[in-house]
Structure formats: structure tokens, C-alpha cells
Image: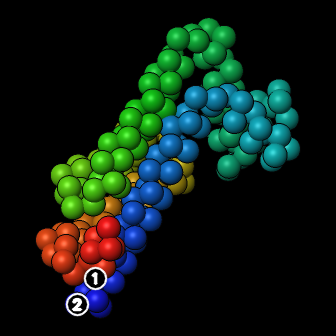
């Protein structure tokens, strides 16, 4: 009995760790959607890319960083309201993270949230590949975007796999030494 209780407690702990990592990734991703121009300028400085260098003067990653920086600079001057869309993108990531608070607190209730998260992760991969191609985003950048969807998908599938042990553990509270001592 105690071994089953420990296994259930360990499953809950691992579930919460995986879900917490997912939530932290969403919060970081959301928070970094707000200061895009500052971030791209810092990236340009880190790679030693000239502030006034035309995008055509660079190739590979450097060329893409300069292209993005110049595009954001032009957009912020001519059409600053477009950045409002990335503000909403950042906010959406924070809201998505908040939807996992309930399952973090009560893992047996997590099935619906996990399934929606799995669907969203698969959708993010598809969006990066299809819409990124339509928008002319380099394949390497799209694959990086896909990696975030794959990481989220892996964490959520792991949580889904742990869930039956957690539900079984919750169904037998008399085998849970923590609840017995409460």
C-alpha cells in the first residue's frame, strides 16, 4: 500500500514539474513578445551586426536578424499600431499559462486542459510550417518555432501518461499517508 501511495505521490510531483515547466515556457514566451524591437536590437549587438547595415549585406542568421530589426524599426515608425498585435500575442501566452493553474493544483481534473494543449501544440507546429512559409519566414526559423510546439507536446503527452496513476492515487485516499496524517 505504501509503495502505491509513493508511486502516486511521485506521479503527482512529476506531473506538476512538467506542467510547471510548460507554464514557465508560456510565461517567458509571452513576456518576450512585448519588447520585440529591444530584443532584436540586443541580438544585433550580440552578433556584432551594424545598426545601419542593409539586410542584403548579411547572409544566413545575421541577414535574418538584420531583416527583422529593420522591418520592426520601419513598422514602429510608420505603423506603430501593428505592434499591438504582438502585445495581444504576449497576453494570450500568459492567459494560456493561467489555464493550467487548475490542473497544477488538482491534477486529476487536468484531462480536458491537457487535450486542448496537445491540440494547440500540434496546431502551432502546423501554423509555423504553413503560415511561416506563406510569409517568407526562413525554414530554420520555422523549425525553431516548431521546436517550441514539440516541447510543449512532449510535456503534455508526459502529463497525459501520468494522469491515470494520479487518478488512481486520488481514488484511494486511504493509501495516501499524507492524507491519513492530515
* Residue under numbered circle 1: 5
* Residue under numbered circle 2: 1
Relative to the observer, which residue lies in front, 33 or 73? 33
What secondary structure is found at the residue carrying circle 2?
loop
Relative to the observer, which residue lies in front, 135 or 17? 17
Q: Is residue 4 left or right of residue 46?
A: left
Q: Is residue 59 left or right of residue 51?
A: left
Q: Position of residue 12 (x, y in %)?
A: 34, 70
Q: Residues within 10 Å of mark 2 (few under 14, many from 20)?
A: few
- Image point 85% across, 35% down: which residue? 50
Q: Is residue 155 left or right of residue 84?
A: left
- Image point 32% across, 42% down: which residue? 99
- Does 152 appear above or below 172? above
Q: Which quadrant would residue 180 be assigned to in this image?
A: bottom left
Contact, CB < 8 Å: mark 1 with mark 2? yes
Does the rendering let one see residue 124?
no
- Image point 38% across, 35% down: which residue? 95
Relative to the observer, which residue lies in front, 43 or 55? 43
Q: Quadrant of the C terminus?
A: bottom left
Q: Position of residue 131 (x, y in %)?
A: 37, 39
Does the rendering let one see residue 116?
yes
Q: Which quadrant would residue 28 be assigned to in this image?
A: top right
Q: Quadrant of the N terminus?
A: bottom left
- Does 129 appear above or below 49? below
Q: Which mark is residue 29?
A: none
Q: Position of residue 128 (x, y in %)?
A: 40, 46
Relative to the observer, which residue lies in front, 134 or 128? 128
Q: Residues within 10 Å of mark 1 (few under 14, many from 20)?
A: many
| Visual colour scheme | rainbow
- Image point 30% across, 48% down: which residue? 102
Q: CA distance from mark 1 to mark 2?
A: 6 Å
Amino acid at each position: 500500500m505504501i509503495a502505491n501511495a509513493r508511486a502516486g505521490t511521485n506521479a503527482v510531483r512529476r506531473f506538476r514539474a512538467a506542467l510547471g515547466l510548460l507554464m514557465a515556457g508560456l510565461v517567458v514566451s509571452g513576456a518576450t513578445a512585448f519588447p520585440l524591437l529591444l530584443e532584436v536590437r540586443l541580438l544585433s549587438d550580440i552578433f556584432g551586426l551594424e545598426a545601419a547595415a542593409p539586410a542584403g549585406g548579411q547572409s544566413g542568421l545575421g541577414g535574418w536578424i538584420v531583416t527583422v530589426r529593420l522591418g520592426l524599426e520601419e513598422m514602429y515608425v510608420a505603423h506603430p499600431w501593428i505592434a499591438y498585435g504582438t502585445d495581444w500575442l504576449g497576453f494570450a501566452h500568459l492567459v494560456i499559462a493561467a489555464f493550467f493553474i487548475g490542473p497544477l493544483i488538482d491534477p486529476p481534473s487536468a484531462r480536458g486542459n491537457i487535450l486542448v494543449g496537445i491540440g494547440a501544440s500540434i496546431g502551432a507546429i502546423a501554423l509555423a510550417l504553413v503560415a511561416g512559409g506563406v510569409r517568407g519566414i526562413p525554414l530554420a526559423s520555422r523549425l525553431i518555432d516548431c521546436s517550441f510546439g514539440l516541447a510543449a507536446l512532449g510535456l503534455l503527452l508526459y502529463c497525459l501518461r501520468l494522469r491515470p496513476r494520479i487518478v488512481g492515487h486520488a481514488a484511494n485516499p486511504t493509501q495516501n499517508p499524507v492524507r491519513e496524517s492530515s
